[in-house]
Image: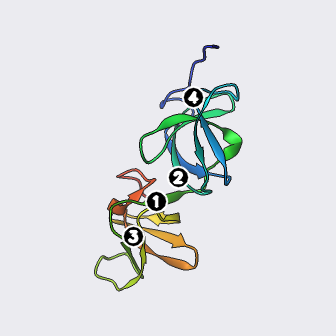
Amino acid sequence: MATFAAHAASDAGYPYYGSIRSGTVFMREGPSAEHKVKWVYRHRGLPVEVIAGYDVWRQVRDQDGETGWMHISMLSRDRTAVIIGTSAAPVRRRAPSDEPVIAYAESGAIGRLETCEAVSCRMVFGNVDGWVDRARLWGIRSNEKF
């Protein structure tokens, strides 16, 4: 098996969050098409944390902590997040937690991140646009704001 030197977190702006670009993406054990497939992801937009890189391959971590390698063409810089927890998360019209609930996002639902503040993030789930408590999201750093 060939050896390689992955670029670590301090190199090339790692880590960062992105998402899966395609409807079917392979996570491999190493950074080449010759490496064994560990997982097959079948959900476009699923957030992943990109933790290292080697040539055209990126080492990623999913929300369950599974790590492996994906080809860069299968990844997007589009920001998404997934609802975590055992119950549905309230989606509110505005950021404060006392605002009216306009919808509930089921655990596992994936939405596009628009902006994040200290306590909540504005997300789009299909035709629903609202604010979700960031503690209910995976795909964003705890202190990240944008």
Residue that mark 1 sits on: 82
Question: Amino acid type of disc 2?
Answer: Pro
- Foreground tag (3 vs 4): 4
Tell whether label 2 touches label 1 (CB within 8 Å).
yes
Tell whether label 1 touches label 4 (CB within 8 Å).
no
What's the distance in space between the residues labelled 3 and 2, CA to CA? 16 Å
State the image coordinates of residue 133 (x, y, percent, origin top left). 35, 67
Q: Quadrant of the N terminus?
A: top right
Residue that mark 2 sits on: 47
What's the distance in space between the residues labelled 4 and 2, CA to CA? 19 Å
Q: Which mark is residue 29?
A: 4
Q: Mark 1 or mark 2: name the one nearer the start of the chain.
A: 2
Dot 4: element: loop
State the image coordinates of residue 96 (x, y, percent, origin top left). 32, 77
What's the distance in space between the residues labelled 1 and 2, CA to CA? 7 Å
Question: Amino acid type of disc 3?
Answer: Val
Side of 74 where 87 appears, left or right: left
Whether 97 is drawn above or below 107: the answer is below
Dot 2: element: strand
Side of 89 where 56 appears, left or right: right
Q: Mark 3 or mark 1: name the one nearer the start of the chain.
A: 1
